[in-house]
Amino acid sequence: MRTAIVTGGGSGIGLAIAEKFVLSGIRTVIIGRDEQKLSAAKELLGDMCITIVADLNDLNKLPEVVTNITNTIGNIDILVNNAGINMKKEFTEVTDEDFQKIILTNVTAVFALSREVVKHMLQNNIKGSIINISSMASQYGIPKVIAYTASKSAIEGMTRAMATELSPKGIRVNCIAPGFIATAMSAKALNNDPERKAKALGRTPMGYLGEPADIGEAALFLAGEGAKYITGTVLPVDGGNSIGF
Ligand code: NDP
């Protein structure tokens, strides 16, 4: 049986990825800070779902998180770096602390967790799959999300660098760039800003927000045998938003 880690698997896109994995027979460890959110997800997903309460910003604790998983559950085959935070603010209002906070969660923690999981995969000769989550913010310019844009652009570069270095060793690394997907995060960014919502939908040829499950399907594909010759890619799952006029 394959085992996956999905960070931020207690809600939104991460929960949909975890659900897809569990339904496909992949034992799935979901990580988040909010115990209640994780418990609710476990109730939904059942025994194939294991929850771990951890703050990914505590970089020093990440090696222990990975060791605990490998000691108690076994090998890790799939890592989905889904946890992320956003912040909508005018460029000049963003403090250095704001900027660093987003980079810490969306970039540094992704690197640090990936490094620990990759060490484990290499030591155990695992043909692994790592999936990072980017955003339309790195496909084109979006105002008022400077730190988020920097972080997601970094994720796409890191995906290519990781793929180049790790694919020869049997670990594929890919990235999904979700378009506008109906979750708590997008509701916060769009629902009190009708102009922005109209703009997002106006350039989405399919004309509606995506569902978290749409990202789940893409993650399952990239994690599996069907994608065995795919590495270093960024796959938009966006109803055409990234190519829309
Ligand atoms: P949510 O806010 O619903 O989910 C984010 C998840 O990340 C939460 O479960 C949260 O768990 C977890 N998380 C955040 N910070 C930490 C941390 N420090 N340690 C552990 N877990 C953390 O957002 P979405 O589902 O919408 O977003 C998921 C990913 O998809 C993000 O990377 C986002 O940037 C990306 N994305 C989303 C889009 C959308 O339209 N919704 C579009 C493009 C990209 P907890 O609160 O328990 O810590």
Image: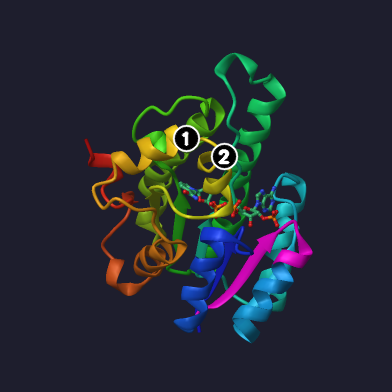
Identity, as a three-letter code, of the amino acid under mark 2: Val
Residue 123 appearing in the image? no
Q: For the C terminus, which image quadrant?
A: top left
Label count reads 2
Q: Is residue 176 above or below residue 22?
A: above
Q: Do the residues under discs 2 and 1 have CB atoms within 8 angstroms? A: yes
Q: Give the side of residue 37 with respect to residue 149, left or right.
A: right
Which secondary structure, mark 1?
Answer: helix
Relative image position of residue 30 (x, y in whole percent):
63, 67
Q: Is residue 164 above or below residue 143?
A: below
Which secondary structure, mark 2?
Answer: helix
Viewer-proximal residue, 74 or 168? 74
Relative image position of residue 130 (x, y in whole percent):
46, 58
Q: Give the side of residue 208 with respect to residue 57, left or right.
A: left
Relative image position of residue 224 (x, y in whole percent):
36, 72
Residue topped by disc 2: 107
Relative image position of residue 29 (x, y in whole percent):
62, 70
> In this picture, which residue range is highlighted in magenta?
26-37
Q: CA distance from mark 2 to mark 1?
A: 7 Å
Identity, as a three-letter code, of the amino acid under mark 1: Ala
Q: Give the side of residue 36 with respect to residue 125, left or right.
A: right
Viewer-proximal residue, 15 or 131? 15
Whether disc 2's CB lies below 8 Å from ligand 1 is answered no
Q: Which mark is residue 242?
A: none
Q: Is residue 26 above or below residue 227?
A: below
Of the numbered discs 2 and 1, the one sitting upstream in the chain is 2
User: Residue, x 72% and y 61% (percent of image)?
Assistant: 65
Residue topped by disc 1: 154
Whether disc 1's CB lies below 8 Å from ligand 1 is answered no
